[in-house]
Amino acid sequence: MIPDAWDIELREGAIGVARHLIETGCVRYDPDHLCRHGSGLVSPVHLEGRRLLSYPAVRDEVLDFALRMIGQEIGDGELDAIAAAEGAGVPWAALIADRMSLPLVFVRKDAPEGQQDYKHRIEGRVEPGWRVLLVEQIAADGHRKARFAQPLKEAGCDVRDLFVLFQYGIFDEIQEHLAPLGITMHALATWWDVLEVANRGHYLDGQAQGEIHAFLHDPKRWTAEHQGSRKSEKAA
């Protein structure tokens, strides 16, 4: 299949985002302090995408690519609001909403104590029938994202798309969690893009590349072999 212009731009953009993540220090290889994920897996690499926000030129370039992706894959003028999932994705959602001149709402992970209604998990105005884009910073297996989409759907919103800065790209479970909800994920880059850039630019030594390759190809096996033998810290 011959790639079209967008396929080429998408590939170039993903490599560009991956390079920015590495060069701004967002990616950290630390085999002695493993990254612990909510799914129970551990990995030798950490990602802190919020560091990109501290570099205005990089931030603008990443945001420009995000807006082109949204326009190409969702459509300009198709959205009525942007929803920020509680956590690290809030600043990215705010930037996107501002650039697109769309309403911004905030979705809580959990309702306040004593409150169960979906309305208490949504801060801001939404209307039934609105098409809402859910925005997060990172997606692993998709379970947490499905939880954020639920109150929006209960409010009558049309939630078909999830936009993330970075998708792990290694968990099959992500489709199991999102597909039943009719949600398509759009991601600027994955670990495979980061590894490609790292290999090209010799950012990592051979041992680091080998460990990361082993984790990406079989994260469950890598976890079983390393969990409990080293310190770990929760993923950002």
Image (cartoon, grey):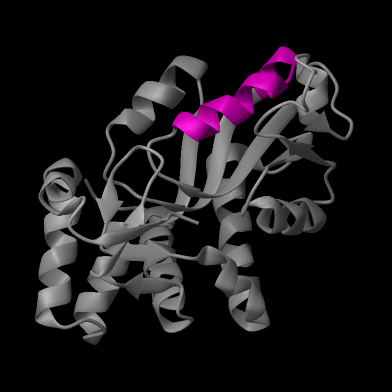
201 relative to 106 in the view: left or right: left
Range of magenta residues:
143-158
Q: Residue 145 in the image: x percent, y percent?
A: 53, 33
Vertical arrangement, residue 187 with respect to residue 194, above or below? above
Q: Residue 173 in the image: x percent, y percent?
A: 31, 29
Q: Residue 19 in the image: x percent, y percent?
A: 39, 76
Query: Where is residue 65, by image quadrant?
Result: bottom right
What residue is shown at x 77% (from left), y 50% (from top)? 97
Vertical arrangement, residue 107 with respect to residue 165, above or below? above
Query: Where is residue 194, by image quadrant?
Result: bottom left
Residue 7 is covered by the magenta coloring: no
Q: How many marks?
A: 0
What residue is shown at x 17% (from left), y 54% (from top)? 215
225 relative to 14 in the view: left or right: left
- Classify the position of the N terminus by image quarter: top left
User: Relative to the observer, which residue lies in front, 124 or 226?
Assistant: 226
Regarding residue 61, the answer to whether it shows in the image is: no
Q: Main secondary structure of the magenta part?
A: helix
What residue is shown at x 72% (from left), y 39% (from top)? 83
What residue is shown at x 53% (from left), y 49% (from top)? 164
Query: Where is residue 209, by image quadrant?
Result: bottom left
211 relative to 87 in the view: left or right: left
48 relative to 115 in the view: left or right: left
Vertical arrangement, residue 214 with respect to residue 78, above or below? below
Residue 144 is covered by the magenta coloring: yes
Q: Residue 32 in the image: x percent, y percent?
A: 25, 70
